[in-house]
Image (cartoon, rainbow, N blue to C red):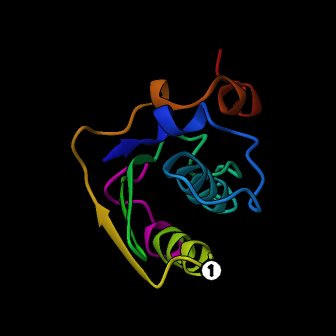
């Protein structure tokens, strides 16, 4: 399984590039970046909520967490992540596994997300 951090290095590959593992992972990450945490107003990738991504055949498998186990927006975030991935032409099935270990911490956020939230 590729981690979101390792996939982020391949940013900027246009969707029309012939599919390779790197471009597929990049497209999955870009799709997940459209999912915004409604309380923090930052996307789930930059928040560090996406732990792992795998794309095998036409199935995308995601391991992700929430900022807290009791996150009231959790069901909404998970549903939006599923819908974002299902919109991709080469994804017919989406499996989202919600994990709480390791627990999310602000250190998982990108520098950009920390700046947006005023965390220095």
Residue 119 vs 3, above or below: the answer is above
Is 61 on the left or on the right of 20, as rendered? left
Is 86 on the left or on the right of 68, as rendered? right
Residue 111 vs 4, above or below: the answer is above
Numbered disc total: 1
Q: Quick one: 98 or 115, which is closer to the camera?
A: 98
Q: Quick one: 69 or 85, which is closer to the camera?
A: 85
Q: Residue at x 50, y 76 (%)?
A: 82
* Location of residue 71 in the rendering, given as x and y in whole percent from the top left corner: 42, 60
Q: Quadrant of the C terminus?
A: top right
* Residue furthest front in the image: 18
Q: Residue at x 30, y 62 (%)?
A: 98
* Location of residue 113 in the rendering, given as x and y in whole percent from the top left corner: 67, 33
Residue 55 vs 57, above or below: the answer is above
* Location of residue 22 in the rendering, given as x and y in whole percent from the top left corner: 54, 45
Is 77 on the left or on the right of 110, as rendered? left
In magenta segment, residue 94: no
Residue 42 vs 7, above or below: the answer is below
Looking at the rendered structure, the secondary structure element under dot 1 is loop
Q: Quick one: 9 or 68, which is closer to the camera?
A: 9
* Residue furthest bottom in the image: 92
* Residue furthest left in the image: 101
Q: Which residue is mark 1?
A: 89
Q: Residue at x 73, y 56 (%)?
A: 17
Magenta-highlighted stretch: main secondary structure? Answer: loop
Quarter-of-image position of residue 33: bottom right
Region of the chain picked out in magenta, as a range: 66-76
* Residue furthest top in the image: 120
Is 83 on the left or on the right of 58, as rendered? right
* Location of residue 32 in the rendering, given as x and y in whole percent from the top left corner: 59, 59
Mark 1 neighbour density, 10 Å: few (under 14) some (14–19) many (20 or more) = few
């Amino acid at each position: 399984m590729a981690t979101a951090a390792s996939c982020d290095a391949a940013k900027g590959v246009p969707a029309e590039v012939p599919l390779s593992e790197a471009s597929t992972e990049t497209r999955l990450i870009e799709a997940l970046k459209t999912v915004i945490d409604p309380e923090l107003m930052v996307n789930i990738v930059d928040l560090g909520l996406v732990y792992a991504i795998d794309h095998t055949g036409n199935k995308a498998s995601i391991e992700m967490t929430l900022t807290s186990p009791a996150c009231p927006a959790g069901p909404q975030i998970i549903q939006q992540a599923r819908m974002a991935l299902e919109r991709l032409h080469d994804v017919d099935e989406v499996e989202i596994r919600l994990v709480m270990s390791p627990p999310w911490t602000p250190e998982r956020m990108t520098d950009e997300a920390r700046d947006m939230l005023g965390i220095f």
